[in-house]
Amino acid sequence: MLVAAPAGAANHYFPDISEVAVPQADCGPGSLPEPGLQGDVSAEDRLSGRSMRGYRCNITRIGGVRGAGGGIVSANFEHCSYTGSLFPGNNWVNPPGVQVIDASDPSAPRVVGSLTDPAMRGGTWETLKVNKERKLLAATSVPLLWGGGFFAVYDISDCTRPKLLNTGPGTSTPLPFTSHEGGFSPDGRTYWASGVFPGHLSAIDIADPRSPRVIWQGLHSFLGHGFGMSPDGNRMYLSNMAGVTVLDVSDVQERRPHPQVPHTAAYLWPDGQLNQHSIPITYRGRPHIVTADEAGSGGVKIFDVTRVNKPRYTAQIKLEINLPEHLDTNLRSSTGGSLFSSNPHYCTVDRATDPTALACGWESSGIRVFDIRDFDRIREIAYYNPPARKGTTIAESPNSPHVVGSLMGLPAVEFLSLGMSIANGKVRLNEMVGPRSGMIVGGDMSTDWCMSPPEFRGNELRVTCSDGGFQVLRLSPAVYTPPPDQNSSIG
């Protein structure tokens, strides 16, 4: 269980709300750029059908396979991709479960199989992850926001033919844990499952993946989400409702008897809510984390964590549509588009040491790519917002959370930040009202939702979006040169 915070532990509050967007990409030949604010899909473009053509800048789509929808978080390994499953919709697909995609020919990827154990059919939500070191794929069952019990580990040495390793515990019999999200320790010996409420965290020992067992559990905060791990596996940067909780998990990592997991620090802020996950990196010899907020237009934040209890707020990435002064336009545009609007969900760096680029699924703003070689001069270099599949029904895409979420029309995740902007006099009420303001119930699928972490492969990106499914994109060599030691990392 968790123990009392050590004397050096502290809460660190960062009150500033950023009012600066990163510079826009300079779009080259063949682009179909956004006509207005950076990241915005306007109400007019949604109503006219313009959003069904999509938007692109310095990116070309090579190929893709839509399937029945892209789930929430998908995973990639070698020339394969694994499409996250949504419950119950994935069970209406033939075959059901997590779809296995062979993208060895990027222009013509194809579904070559599916994973159908209880965890994979129960909805993988944000738990479907790969450990490259051990060539393992794992996920837990999350039917709706919160789940537990079923857990599956696959050998993906042959990525097109994953082999289920744990046919006993986790598959034929449930394990005692809850989850909303999950992921591996860097060495692949532990799978951590984090629940949303009440902040329940579990460590599953998979040193022998044929026989997983829960070796530690505890409560850490009011709400939990995703996380990132330090390279040695001893420190966890665990997302909470308004920031990051830092935990010392070395007892678990080193398999000490009677492990304790003390709080080391917490980083809190009002600029964005529902922190999603963190990517530990090294920048110019100093450890940092890159962390994304799923809601509230907080964008992506970067902290220097050389001294974990004296963190330094280094940089922030926002699009123009995320700025406090534009949250009225944000609401006007995104009403009728359902729960999510324009926020980063999952991001990827192209390498963990001195990364040169960051790519994020930015929900309704599509895939966004940034040059991060110099944290003082971060800029956007490319984006791809897939053509909207307006009018898509649940019968066509039962594995799309966007289709399911379109029972409602309001972008509910923005209202806390919008309220702060109203209180601070940053927005105008009349600018919130537009031709879609009455679409409170029933979204119209007038954008896609890109929520999975992109994967860098040379000049290509492997991405999965909720409606458009798996896609292979090519970055223009004019804006991105892959580093020789490129190795995508999501933390």
Image (cartoon, helix red, strand yellow):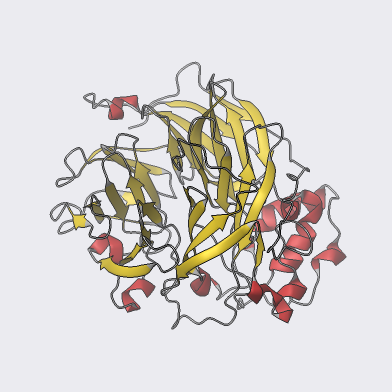
The answer to whether residue 226 shows anywhere in this view is: yes
**Residue 20 shown left or right of residue 310 in the figure:** right
For residue 440, above or below residue 356: below
| Quadrant of the image occupied by residue 114 | bottom left
Counting the numbered discs, the total is 0
**Residue 217 shown left or right of residue 318 in the figure:** left
For residue 49, above or below residue 117: below
Residue furthest out toward the top? 7
x, y percentage for residue 57?
67, 58
**Residue 464 shown left or right of residue 434 in the figure:** left
For residue 440, above or below residue 209: below
Residue furthest out toward the left? 168
Residue drawn at the location 29% of the way across and 29% of the way down? 252
The answer to whether residue 336 shows anywhere in this view is: no
Residue drawn at the location 65% of the way across and 58% of the way down? 342
Residue drawn at the location 77% of the way across and 43% of the way down? 20
x, y percentage for residue 339?
59, 65
x, y percentage for residue 94?
30, 78
Nearer to me, 77 or 275:
77
x, y percentage for residue 247?
43, 30
| Quadrant of the image occupied by residue 207 | top left
Residue drawn at the location 67% of the way across and 34% of the way down? 315
Quadrant (top left/top right/bottom left/bottom right) for the N terminus? top left
**Residue 180 shown left or right of residue 223 in the figure:** left
Nearer to me, 39 or 398:
39
Quadrant (top left/top right/bottom left/bottom right) for the C terminus? top left
| Quadrant of the image occupied by residue 92 | bottom left
